[in-house]
Amino acid sequence: MEVNSTQNNRELEKINTLSLKDKNIKTLLMTKNIEYLNSRKESIRGFTLMDPGATCTLISERFAQKLGISDSEIKHKTELEVDGYAGKKSRFTSYRIKIEFKLKNGTITSAEGYTTPNLDQMKIYCPSDPREFWLHDDKEIEVKQRTPDILFGLSDVLKLLENIENLSNQRFLLRTKVGPIICGRAKIKEAEIQDETQYVMSAVGEITEKVEEKDFWNLETIGIRDPGLTIPDDEIAWKQFRESINQLPDGRYEVGWPWRIESKRTLQTNFGVSLGRLRSLWKKYRENPEVLEAIDKTIKEQLDLNMIEIAPKNTNIVHYLPHQPVFKSSSSFTKLRVVFDAGSGKTPLNNELLRGAVLLPQLPGVLIRTLMFNNLLIADIAKAFFTDPIETGRSGMLLDSSG
């Protein structure tokens, strides 16, 4: 985060969250070398930044690999966007993982966080000799720049914090469950000062967005929010739409799938997952023939209406989608829906396609606008998504696990 300001023709002053560039004065943040446990329960020291301004804990991908986090320990995969001051944004694919570390009394505790590739871009100052920083208030100290392996967010910082002591005017001793931490203002030797600017999280460069005025008033240093639909994704989707749209003989239109530009389209067959889901459904509902009959009726109805088709067996590329019934007793029309799971398997179809904008934030506006009119007409298109034909040549790529 950086703020540039000029006043009375003074020299440009740079201020960021990691250091205060006022002559040789810098603010040293809360950092600590903590012993983490790898997959073999061996101790590995990790340089850790305690950041109460962060809404979650972040682990560098490099350090996660060093810890040997296995696939079975990964909670789930998600897309995160990190916001910084003045519209600095960084968006990346992240995995939620569990890490274990030692406390000062020797016991083992754990925390959960998200992997990120961006901690490697982060450079923060720390004292070369912590004892010198602790004992001497007015003495210029030597510092070094380090890249954190892990950033603890507010929740984990508060869990570890025991009490705070004010050592001097702007220097503090934090007694924590992982040991003492010294932080605050310090005089730095002139040779140690560098002109580079450090960001809490710098955008990786692939995402180019217009910085709006409201971004400058977003004071949250690090925040996780739904990334929504970015401008590049929107342009890519429209380009693919224009290139693939085609009118069918019956007057309807078909378009291609909105592939992600980085998609390798190397989908696995997913047959084992689909077959396992089918067996699980059969085992669950075999004592309830009414549900099985309803599922069978729905699939046959979709076949009769040409909403789905039986894929030919000589299809070269096949990706099976497991299905499951979804019940909605409050619905006036469709009590049971057959849903096909495009998020299953190691290479899910959902990860290869542009997902589109998140429309939920627009819901309050829609509800408010309904109050402007005397009469309101609501229409429900039955099985709306099944009425969209898939581009010829791609329909054979999908088979459902029902047959």
Image (cartoon, helix red, strand yellow):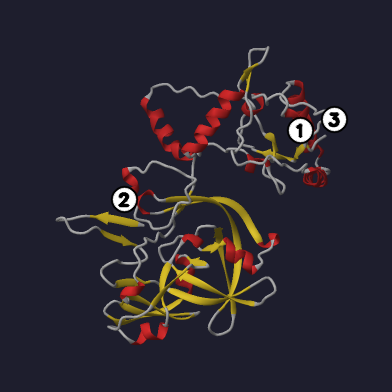
Residue at 77%, 43% (x, y): give it: 270
Whichever of labels 3 and 1 marks the residue nearer the N terminus, that label is 1
Tag 1 residue: 294
- Viewer-proximal residue, 37 or 324? 37
Question: As shown in the figure, which amino acid type bears the numbered disc 3?
Answer: Asn
The x and y percentages for residue 15 are 30, 61
Whichever of labels 2 and 1 marks the residue nearer the N terminus, that label is 2
Tag 3 residue: 314
Mark 2 secondary-structure assignment: helix
Question: As shown in the figure, which amino acid type bears the numbered disc 1?
Answer: Ala
The x and y percentages for residue 377 are 48, 22
Q: Is residue 255 visible?
A: yes
Question: Which mark's residue is nearer the viewer, 2 or 3?
Answer: 3
| Residue 313 sits above or below residue 92 on the image | above
Q: Rounded to the nearest whole Å, what is the CA distance between mark 3 and mark 1?
A: 30 Å
Tag 2 residue: 217
| Residue 193 sits above or below residue 373 on the image | below
Q: Is residue 271 left or right of residue 116?
A: right
Q: Is residue 402 left or right of residue 143?
A: right
Residue at 65%, 24% (x, y): give it: 387
- Viewer-proximal residue, 75 or 23? 23
| Residue 13 sits above or below residue 180 on the image | above
